[in-house]
């Protein structure tokens, strides 16, 4: 009998909306073509990945015959690790009440999962999230796939939050009957991906006040993925957790042990001030995976207890600064500024954010990008990092993974293309 009963799969709206993640394509491009120098994917420094600390932690676990980490753990994450992360957070936010912190923490499969959980429990398709400008493009792609609209928080020419612009934006949204659809505000507050900029305390206070003035006491998500990755100066601004102007807002503070320790362990964490929001995220996490890898958490517990995180941070901070300088100085030396590009040196994190002349289009399918790939260098096109009102003459350069000689070579290749445009 002919088999003619097959028919195309009918995917859900969510399945249809989910496009291929650009981050995966960029990571693959780098892995598949070793001659291509990738300033695109946010890999970390290979040479300083903490093999000895991880080996020691695993040996210690084996020595004491700890079988339990090889078993499933708990949905919310290992209590010991949560306690340690709470203590770590209190080094940044000394006023947080000790009693609360462990309960408010949850461990996730990278902070990426926490971002997903937060959005999944807050938003319906068509809802709005206010985002910083520019912002983390993987987050933008994720919310787009959920049918959520990103609306950028206005900034001035210096990239600082613009109070008048913000007020006007909120006035317009409220006037258009959209107030109910605005479900959250999200920003990357320290050494941002992509801009390497940190929000200062005054900007954070202003943002809370303007939102409150419009009666928009929204859930706020502060993404502090790079807070620990300062080079020499600890960033001064407190997080929203310790700023009075935010006290009435439900707050979710996110960070991760991937960038400051080992990306491959993929352990991130969140601290949520709102019980119900936390509970709903945990229920949803239960549906995703009912717990992040217990073994990785046990390893990290050992590492932190023995001072390994502090040691690793002391190792990588100067390393990333040296890498940043290698790339920055190459771009300067090769005349990229004279070609009309501007950027700031980073004080922490893994990125340089370059603004090109108005006529340059850095998008993936544009001539500039093709020429860079032909020249053997890849970057993240800046248009991906804008929630709306997209600018096409920016690029994000990640200096995390390449060694300094490669960074200089990548900078030279990029400069050659930039000069010829
Ligand atoms: C701003 C920001 N937030 C969150 C993440 C997610 O990191 P992870 O899932 O590795 O913790 C990243 C990763 O690049 C990031 O840049």
Image: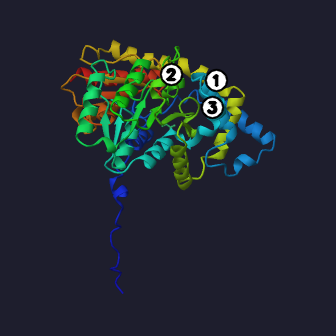
- Whether disc 1's CB lies below 8 Å from ligand 1 is answered no
Q: Quadrant of the C terminus?
A: top left
Q: Mark 3 = which residue?
A: 86
Q: Does any portion of residue 196 appear in the rendered image?
A: no
Nearer to me, 190 or 420: 190
Q: Earlier in the sequence, mark 3 or mark 2?
A: 3
The 10 Å Cα crowd at callout 2, few under 14, some 14 to 19, many 20 or more, is: some
* Left or right for 134, reference 312: left
How far across and down, in percent of the image, does residue 396 sit? Answer: 36, 28
Residue 354 place in picture, x, y as percent: 32, 23
* Distance Cα–Cα, label 1 vs label 2: 20 Å
Tag shown at residue 310? 1
Residue drawn at (27%, 36%), measured in percent from left and top?
388
Front label number (3 vs 1): 3
- Per the image, label 3 sits on a secondary structure element best described as helix
Residue designated by label 2: 238
């Amino acid at each position: 009998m002919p088999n003619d009963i097959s028919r195309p799969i009918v995917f859900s709206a969510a399945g249809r909306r989910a496009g291929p993640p650009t981050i995966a394509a960029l990571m693959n491009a780098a892995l598949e073509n070793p001659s291509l120098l990738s300033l695109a994917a946010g890999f970390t420094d290979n040479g300083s990945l903490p093999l000895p600390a991880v080996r020691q932690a695993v040996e210690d676990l084996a020595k004491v015959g700890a079988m339990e980490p090889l078993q499933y753990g708990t949905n919310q994450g290992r209590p010991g690790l949560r306690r340690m992360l709470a203590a770590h957070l209190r080094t940044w936010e000394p006023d947080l009440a000790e009693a609360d912190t462990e309960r408010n923490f949850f461990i996730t499969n990278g902070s990426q999962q926490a971002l997903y959980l937060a959005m999944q429990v807050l938003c319906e398709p068509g809802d709005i999230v206010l985002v910083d400008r520019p912002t983390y493009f993987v987050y933008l792609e994720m919310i787009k796939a959920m049918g959520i609209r990103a609306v950028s928080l206005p900034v001035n020419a210096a990239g600082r939050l613009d109070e008048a612009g913000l007020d006007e934006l909120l006035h317009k949204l409220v006037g258009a009957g959209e107030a109910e659809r605005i479900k959250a505000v999200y920003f990357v507050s320290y050494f941002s991906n992509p801009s390497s900029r940190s929000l200062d305390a005054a900007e954070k206070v202003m943002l809370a006040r303007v939102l409150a003035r419009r009666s928009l006491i929204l859930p706020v998500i502060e993404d502090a993925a790079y807070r620990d990755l300062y080079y020499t100066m600890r960033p001064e601004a407190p997080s929203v957790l310790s700023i009075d102007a935010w006290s009435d807002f439900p707050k979710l503070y996110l960070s991760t042990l991937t960038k400051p320790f080992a990306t491959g362990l993929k352990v991130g964490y969140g601290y949520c001030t709102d019980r119900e929001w936390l509970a709903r995220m945990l229920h949803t996490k239960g549906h995703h995976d009912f717990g992040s890898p217990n073994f990785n958490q046990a390893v990290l517990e050992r590492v932190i207890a023995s001072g390994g995180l502090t040691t690793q941070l002391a190792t990588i901070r100067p390393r990333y600064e040296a890498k940043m300088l290698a790339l920055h100085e190459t771009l300067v030396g090769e005349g990229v500024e004279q070609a009309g590009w501007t950027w700031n040196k980073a004080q922490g994190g893994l990125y340089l954010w370059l603004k090109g002349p108005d006529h340059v289009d850095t998008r993936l399918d544009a001539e500039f990008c093709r020429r860079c790939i032909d020249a053997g260098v890849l970057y993240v096109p800046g248009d991906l990092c804008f929630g709306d009102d997209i600018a096409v003459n920016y690029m994000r350069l990640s200096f995390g993974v390449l060694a300094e000689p490669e960074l200089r070579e990548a900078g030279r290749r990029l400069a050659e293309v930039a000069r010829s445009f």
